[in-house]
Amino acid sequence: MSEQSVSLYQKRIQIYPRSVKGRFRNLKTGVLVLAYIVYYLLPWLRWERPNAPNQAVLYDLPGRHFYIFDLTIQVQDIFWLAGVLIIFAILLFFVTGIAGRVWCGYFCFQTLWTDLYMFVERWIQGERPARMRLDRGPWNREKWLKKGATYGLWLLIAFWTGLTFVMYWVNAPTLVVEIFTGHAPYAAYFTTFFLTTTTFVMAGLAREQVCTYMCPYARFQSAMFDHDTLIVSYDQRRGEGAKGRAKLGKGLKSREERQAQGVGDCIDCGYCVQVCPVGIDIRNGLQYQCISCALCIDACDIVMDNQRWPRGLVGYTSENALNGRKTRLIKPKTIGYGVILTATTTLLIWSVLTRTPYNGTVEQIRQPLYTLLSDGSIRNSYEIKLNNKLTAAMTLGIRIEGLPGAKLSMDGMERIELAPQERIKLLAWVQVPPAEKDRSSGHQVTFIIEPLAGVEATPIQQRVPFYIPEEDQ
């Protein structure tokens, strides 16, 4: 008895998306153009800085500074990144609960670059029928030229995508010159090559396979859906009628004729399937592959307009609306997400707006814990760390309070000028004369670090211990 081999993997069915015009296509194009303008041109936007490259957005890893216009983010401000990630996560849950996978359909990087690659493919190879004929045909001169031009332009876009990403970490004009003259760092070449390869493969070759099999969001999105979530849906009752869908034909051309025959409004033209970038049939119900790009809505609206029938056979709706119930967008889950999102965003904005222009810390040096001088005075040593967080110079003064008779000695560094974004460590000595040792109750001294020039800010006050041996108290 012969055994039949069973394939565990479905062979990929090549998808040839057809172009479509409409309000959702216009929205997608607008988002695409805006995203590319920001991504590709932002590294070239100049922003004058006295101590760093004049680039508006620059992530300077060696200097451990992130520059975003006038905002300078340092290592100790990394919690802002955690706040941004929390906001994005809550926003994703909030929007998905209301409108489904609109992130995937309009803003996801995979969607944006795949859209651009399909524009290039359509421009060079033609519309859907022309591309299908080209792929089925032999490798002649026309096919070599069109495929070569398509892949060449794809590679150029992928290369510039990878290079642009690296520009956010190095001064853009300098990097471009170094890349093409062979003087750029190894990491720049590796990152550019890696992103060039992944962009070409993901957006040009894999396409819908990334959304269907690689992206985890397609798998857990259903956990955020409910009966009120707005999704791209097909009105089956209207489209199918009592006897299902049927093409236009004799006795089935007008809506009245079709209703009399029990046939729905769907003329089974397949336009909604042809424009889908992931190749699904929306008439089969909600499917995890659907990225909610709404191009099928535009396609169906065009057909309905041509027939002079009402739009909405395919549209954004909810499961409750399809079943004749009211859609509730304001509900406890939505309110909860909204409150958390508002609170987190407000807290992050407040933290950024109230950030201090400098910081300073004082720590007691415990080796040795104290020094007994020849005149009986007690001296403790301290380490002071100062950090200028601005891109301008500032002058700071350091003094002490709270310890009777104590004197501060810093070898003339009690007044110090910090260069832009300079970090420095200083040594300080606090000395208490013998006559004041018994009056030093609590054995604590308060260091006051205050701006004297270059910035207006609240002085930093830090209380630290002052050690006096028990036999001297």
Image (spheres, grey):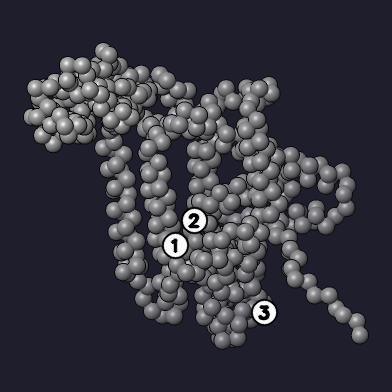
What label sits on residue 103 in the rendered view?
Answer: 2
How many callouts does the rendering have? 3
Report whether residue 78 is seen. Answer: yes
**Which of the pair 210/107 is nearer the observer?**
210
**SS for tag 1?**
helix
Give the class, few, some or many, for how many residues have Cα within 10 Å of label 3's Cα (few <14, many ≥20). Answer: few
Q: Amino acid at mark 2?
A: Trp
User: Which residue is farthest front?
Assistant: 471
Residue position for label 1: 96
**SS for tag 2?**
helix
Residue position for label 3: 250
User: Which residue is farthest top?
Assistant: 412
Q: Position of residue 161 (x, y in %)?
A: 61, 38
Q: Are the residues at dot 1 and dot 2 in contact (C-beta closer than 8 Å)?
A: yes
Q: With 205 as the anchor, is 384 left or right in this view?
A: left
Q: Earlier in the sequence, mark 1 or mark 2?
A: 1
Between the C-alphas of marks 1 and 2, the distance is: 8 Å
Which residue occupies 19% across, 31% down?
Answer: 468
**SS for tag 3?**
loop
Between the C-alphas of marks 3 and 2, the distance is: 43 Å
Give the class, few, some or many, for how many residues have Cα within 10 Å of label 2's Cα (few <14, many ≥20). Answer: some
Say above or below: 69 vs 342.
Answer: above
Q: Nearer the viewer, mark 3 or mark 2?
A: 2
Q: Position of residue 229 (x, y in %)?
A: 43, 69
Q: Amino acid at mark 1?
A: Thr
Which residue occupies 51% across, 53% down?
Answer: 106
Q: Quadrant of the N terminus?
A: bottom right
Give the class, few, some or many, for how many residues have Cα within 10 Å of label 1's Cα (few <14, many ≥20). Answer: many
